[in-house]
């Protein structure tokens, strides 16, 4: 017994194939993966320096009880892990979505960069270690590089072509 293929209506209903990402998008993606790698290093360093957290908590307020110090340590470790993984995930997610030509992803990346800028400015005002400030500055520069390449002319054409489909 032989079957006939389902009729397609005469026209081509197939979606046009997406053009490859232009060099500026590929460079922005590399910046974003570098941001993810730097965020992973930050997470590792944060976890490696957790041992000094207890003494920092004690010196901040010597009247804390042992259970209060322990609770503060748990909050500190949880914060480092959650924000570290969130940072890594956002960098990778933005790299993949911008590489796929999703117009909204460029906007989200811009908003995240704006938040990073505010965080850097506020971090400079807070009492911070020089190393931490330099590290945040390096993350910011990586974000700036990604944003610059996301808004180049060939990148805009790539996102606009994706929007038409």
Image (cartoon, rainbow, N blue to C red):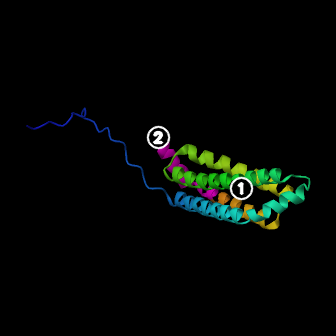
Q: Residue at x 51, y 61 (%)?
A: 23
**Residue 135 in sight in this render:** yes
| Marks 1 and 2, how far apart at CA | 46 Å
Residue bounds of the magenta highlight: 146-165
**Residue 102: x, y in percent?**
52, 46
Report the mark closest to the observer, 1 or 2. 1
In the image, taking residue 2 as reference, residue 126 lies left or right, namely right
Decide which of 91, 142 is in the foreground and name it: 91
**Residue 22: x, y in percent?**
49, 57
In the image, taking residue 78 as reference, residue 52 lies left or right, namely right
Which element is circle 1 on?
A: helix
| On-image quarter of the N terminus | top left
**Residue 94: x, y in percent?**
57, 51
**Residue 48: x, y in percent?**
70, 66
Asked if 112 appears above or below 142 in the picture, the reply is above
Q: Which mark is residue 77?
A: 1
Task: Count how many numbered circles sit on residues in the image.
Answer: 2
Is 109 a magenta residue?
Answer: no
Q: Residue at x 86, y 52 (%)?
A: 65
Of all residues, the one furthest to the left in this rendering is: 1
Q: Which mark is residue 24?
A: none
Q: Which residue is mark 2?
A: 164
| On-image quarter of the C terminus | top left
Is 164 a magenta residue?
Answer: yes
């Amino acid at each position: 017994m032989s079957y006939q293929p389902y009729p397609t209506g005469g026209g081509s209903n197939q979606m046009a194939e997406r053009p490859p990402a232009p060099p500026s998008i590929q460079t922005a993606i590399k910046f974003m993966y570098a941001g993810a790698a730097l965020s992973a290093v930050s997470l590792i360093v944060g976890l490696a320096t957790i041992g000094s957290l207890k003494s920092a908590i004690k010196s901040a307020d010597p009247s804390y009880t042992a259970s209060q110090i322990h609770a503060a340590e748990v909050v500190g470790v949880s914060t480092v892990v959650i924000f570290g993984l969130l940072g890594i995930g956002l960098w990778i997610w933005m790299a993949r979505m911008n590489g796929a030509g999703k117009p909204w992803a460029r906007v989200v990346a811009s908003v995240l960069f704006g938040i990073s800028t505010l965080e850097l400015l506020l971090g400079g005002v807070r009492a911070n270690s020089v190393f931490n400030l330099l590290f945040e500055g390096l993350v910011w520069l990586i974000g700036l590089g990604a944003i610059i390449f996301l808004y180049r002319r060939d990148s805009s054409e790539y996102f606009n072509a994706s929007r038409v489909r």
